[in-house]
Image (spheres, rainbow, N blue to C red):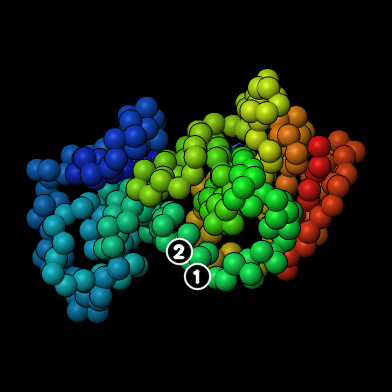
């Protein structure tokens, strides 16, 4: 995991964030730094037309306002012009700006692209896809229908939440889902998304290696644990989508995944489901553990360890 990432945000952005997100920022001063833009000289750039761009550079704009200045009436810059904003900050090092885009969604902005999470939008996307199609997929089968029947309400713990896409899918099938994330910035975005659109029972910050549900009475443990560590880098593979590439750069590799699996096998009551590349090595292999069964998709596979 990579954690040496620095994020800048304006004090106006800070004021707009939910309380819990503000608390997290204050607890992590080595990651986040806040600059005072209230009386800042950048005010003079409020209207992008004041900038000395030639006509070729005046284009329509996707992200007009990294500093949350008052929106200009028309949109002027394309994403590539964000690089110019970053030039303003050359004197201080940072990797990302935390800001809002034109749709008022919170984003981590970099000159190469942006990263954001929106539980409402992603859940709606899953609901649009027919339930029938999704329930024929390998993730659904790896847990089995009993996990999603309303009368049984099984509890699933996602030990590596990431962008929470899989957790949202499990949630849309009808499971009760909680989870954990150890990367501070990824957790920060999960926290923000959960504050804006509460979806999960609980999202914890920390390492699932530190979980100790096995100390709980059996009936209080999670029925299943889902684990999806970052895949090892495959240089032969085609380049990932821009947003996914940014996420991969942000998080880095999860080199301890086999050790984590061994630990997770002690924590659940019924099963641990592990997502792997279609032909990736079995995570249990180094411990001479074999999955009870596997379900295959087109690019991924789900190994099920029954307990
Ligand atoms: C491949 S991504 C997970 C993707 C996720 N399933 C999704 O749908 O977006 C892996 C994520 O799990 C996190 N992670 C990996 N090992 C972890 C651990 N032991 N404890 C907590 N988080 C972990 C990483 O920081 C990363 O954000």
Identity of the residue furthest to the front in this view: 151
Instruction: State the quadrant of the C terminus.
Output: top right
Q: Position of residue 138 (x, y in %)?
A: 72, 61
- Image-based side of 280 in relation to 92, left or right: right
Element at label 1: helix
Residue 124 circle label: 2
Quadrant field for ligand 1: top right
Element at label 2: helix
Looking at this view, is 79 or 280 the one in front? 280
Q: Residue at x 50, y 70 (%)?
A: 128
The residue identified by callout 1 is: 128
Q: Position of residue 201 (x, y in %)?
A: 49, 40
Residue 48 circle label: none
Q: Position of residue 112 (x, y in %)?
A: 42, 61
Q: Position of residue 97 (x, y in %)?
A: 33, 49
Q: In terms of image quadrants, where is residue 216?
A: top right
Q: Is residue 216 above or below residue 187?
A: above
| Neighbours of disc 2 within 10 Å: few (<14), some (14-19), many (20+) | few
Q: Is residue 224 visible?
A: yes
Q: Residue at x 81, y 55 (%)?
A: 294
Q: Is residue 256 visible?
A: no
Q: Are marks 2 and 1 in contact (CB under 8 Å)?
A: yes
- Image-based side of 124 in relation to 130, left or right: left
Q: Is residue 140 above or below residue 212?
A: below
Q: Is mark 2 within 8 Å of ligand 1?
A: no
Q: Residue at x 29, y 51 (%)?
A: 99
- Image-based side of 115 in relation to 221, left or right: left
Gap between marks 2 and 1 measured at Cα = 6 Å
Q: In terms of image quadrants, where is residue 263?
A: top right
Q: In terms of image quadrants, where is residue 66?
A: bottom left
């Amino acid at each position: 995991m990579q954690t040496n990432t620095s994020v800048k945000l304006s004090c106006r952005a800070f004021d707009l964030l939910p309380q819990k997100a503000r608390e997290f920022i204050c607890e992590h001063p080595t990651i986040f730094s806040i600059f005072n833009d209230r009386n800042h000289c950048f005010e003079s750039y409020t209207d992008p037309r004041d900038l000395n761009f030639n006509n070729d550079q005046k284009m329509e704009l996707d992200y007009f306002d990294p500093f949350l200045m008052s929106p200009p009436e028309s949109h002027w810059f394309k994403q590539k012009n964000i690089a110019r904003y970053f030039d303003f900050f050359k004197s201080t090092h940072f990797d990302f700006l935390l800001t809002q885009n034109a749709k008022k969604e919170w984003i981590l902005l970099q000159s190469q692209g942006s990263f954001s999470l929106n539980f409402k939008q992603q859940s709606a996307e899953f609901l649009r896809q027919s339930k029938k199609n999704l329930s024929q997929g390998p993730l659904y089968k790896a847990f089995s229908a009993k996990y999603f029947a309303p009368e049984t309400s099984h509890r699933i713990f996602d030990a590596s939440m990431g962008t929470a896409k899989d957790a949202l899918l499990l949630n849309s099938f009808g499971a009760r889902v909680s989870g954990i994330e150890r990367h501070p910035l990824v957790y920060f975005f999960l926290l923000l998304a959960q504050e804006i659109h509460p979806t999960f029972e609980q999202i914890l910050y920390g390492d699932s290696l530190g979980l100790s549900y096995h100390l709980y009475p059996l009936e209080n443990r999670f029925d299943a644990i889902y684990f999806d560590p970052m895949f090892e880098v495959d240089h032969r593979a085609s380049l990932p989508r821009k947003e996914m590439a940014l996420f991969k750069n942000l998080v880095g590799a999860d080199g301890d995944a086999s050790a984590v699996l061994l630990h997770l096998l002690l924590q659940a009551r019924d099963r641990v489901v592990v997502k792997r590349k279609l032909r990736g090595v079995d995570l249990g292999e180094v411990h001479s553990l074999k999955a009870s069964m596997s379900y295959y998709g087109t690019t991924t596979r789900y190994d099920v360890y029954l307990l």
